[in-house]
Amino acid sequence: MTKQKKLRHSEYYDLQPTFDKLYSDSQNGKIFTNLLEVISSEENIRLAYRNIKKNGGSSTTGIDKLSIKDIENMSIESYVNIIKRKLTWYKPKPVKRVEIPKPNGKMRPLGIPTIVDRLVQQCILQVLEPICEAKFFERSNGFRPNRSAEQAIAQCYKMIQLQNLHFVVDIDIKGFFDNVNHSKLIKQMWNLGIRDKKLLCIIKEMLKAPIVMPDGKVVYPTKGTPQGGILSPLLSNIVLNELDWWITSQWEEMPTKYQYKCEIRPNGTKNKSPIYGALRNTSKLKEVYIIRYADDFKLFCRKKSDAEKVFIAVKCWLKERLKLEISEEKSKVVNLKRHYSEFLGFELKAVKKRKKYVVRSHMTEKAKIREKKKLVEQIKNIAHTKNREDEAKEITLYNSMVMGIHNYYCIATMISSDCKILHRNVSIVMKNRLRKRLSKKGKINEVYIRKQYGKSKQIRFISSKTICPIGYIQTKTPMFKKKKICKYTPEGREEIHKNLKINTRTMLELMRVKDKRRSIEYMDNRISLFAAQYGRCNVTGKELSINEIHCHHKVPIKLGGTDEYSNLVILHQDIHILIHSTDIETQNTYLKLINPDKKALNKINELRLLVGNSKL
């Protein structure tokens, strides 16, 4: 789910002002002692369902064998009451442990809570996120709204190219998620101003939930946060937020005797060059900057001696302060002028170009091997399809894998040469496996493929389906996050997406309408459709008031239809009556009233046929 969609969901349920206030209060140092009231509000509970229902893991069952499918047919009242009761006296059910393969061949343990526990975690996440966002460090990029790996890489480029910091400290925390200290985490939340004791007790219970291992054995954890839990990424950022600010206090935020004048740049950032110059000339402080993505972080230094001292200091600090060990094998000081340093699947190095050093970046060797293996396996799947329909699905999946590689790694400066190597390896397999079906001639029917790959000579076709070329890619400059972008301020939201172009007041009135006969899936999708159709009738295109809105099942429930988004459409009430009408006199009355043009009449007839009525 995109971050923009999550933002819109908050606006659908009229919770954005509440979240904005939490963010503002947190910035001003307010202490929060009654957060459970917001967490257990009906709007927040309904928003939790909305945000979680399309998640990739929402259909995965927990220890109780239930998934989101078992929730979606409940009435809103039943669903809200279940979550409220759970929050009143919280006792989590055991977490199911599953293991998935890691790129290095080892297994990654995941903890899967029950679907109700996941919804409870989502309710808490929605309220804690604005509070924590106000306190998090600017260069913490992982698992946060409107931040990504691209911004972390852009920050690295800036450190290397503009600030000439060519010594980097690579720190790898050993089993971070499995070794988070529970007591320390709760203290950190208390220091952030989250002092609702009942909420802290709920989070403690979540952390201590029993784990059912694959062999059926039950383990009671004393440390760690379960990977797979919805709240775990936020909790991990809370743990390491203290590290961010400690590193920052050693140089960037070091107080000075004199108040130096610092220019405010057009983008809103402060130019601290006068302060840094004074610190270099008058102190023996170690110049150090941190860039972090979840538990993966780099420390940039100007001198090798500083980097070596920082390495020892951070190692000791993690051990004493956070009770975390580092991996001695993977942690080291790297001279970027001589060696590559790996970060988020990229290799970074400083190379001389004329009189300055610039970044040279590649995909890591591990990433190349991993992506090559995936693409080759997918080609084999295409080769073994039994019919055209399966073949089309497998080709679409292959294309999505190629586009995923290109979208993520296009910010590497040498990605073109990396993709050429991948192309050579993959094209050999493709020619051998798909020789009889592969063609150079064909028409690109898919608009999104034509836009991105239309000029490539490497495009191939199978049964009129386009195969995206892995070797055709253009480098993109990684972009920083705009300073004013923020999910929790009106100005920041303007930068994220344009106005919804709908009558927000009508949408909120629609959200508050309760119908005990309808499922939560129906009520939730009705709001989505209203926003997607910009508050207009699907047939006439006219803007609708609250009393005119009808949500129509294209295929009626009695004929096997469902409450899924694709089976619903927002219509004017007169159009809805006309679609279901079987009486000639009623049909004539409403046709005169609506006076549809040819296009609108065709739409009405299409919908009438779906409900089993004849054309008008």
Image: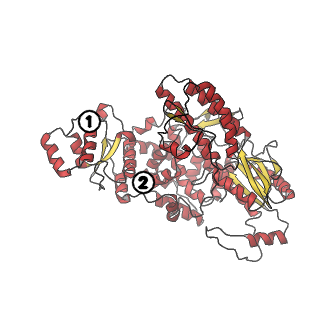
Q: Which mark is residue 136?
A: none
Answer whether residue 243 is visible to the viewer in this image: no
Which residue occupies the foreground of this view, 321 or 527? 527
Marks 2 and 1: which is nearer the front? 1
User: In the shown orientation, is residue 596 left or right of residue 266?
Assistant: left
Residue at the location (51% across, 38% down)? 58
Q: Amino acid at mark 2?
A: Tyr
Toward the left, the furthest residue is: 585
- The span from disc 2 to disc 1 (Cα, nearest Å) is 32 Å
**Callout 2 environment at 10 Å: few (<14), some (14 to 19), or many (20+)?**
many
Mark 1 closeness class: few <14, some 14–19, many ≥20 residues within 10 Å: some
Given residues 345 and 105, the one toward you in this image is 345
Instruction: Examine the rendered structure and indicate whether residue 489 appears above or below residue 590.
Output: below
Q: Residue at x 44, y 38 (%)?
A: 71
Q: Is residue 228 left or right of residue 585?
A: right
Quadrant where the C terminus is found in the figure: top left
Q: Secondary structure at mark 2?
A: helix
Residue 609 occupies quadrant: top left
As drawn, which residue projects farthest toward the front? 441
Give the amino acid at mark 1.
Leu
| Res 146 visible | yes
Residue 136 lies, in percent from the top left, at 64, 58
Q: Which residue is mark 1?
A: 609
On screen, residue 110 versus residue 16, left or right, reads right
Provide residue 477's location: percent of width, then percent of height: 64, 54
Q: 118 or 611: which is nearer to us?
A: 611
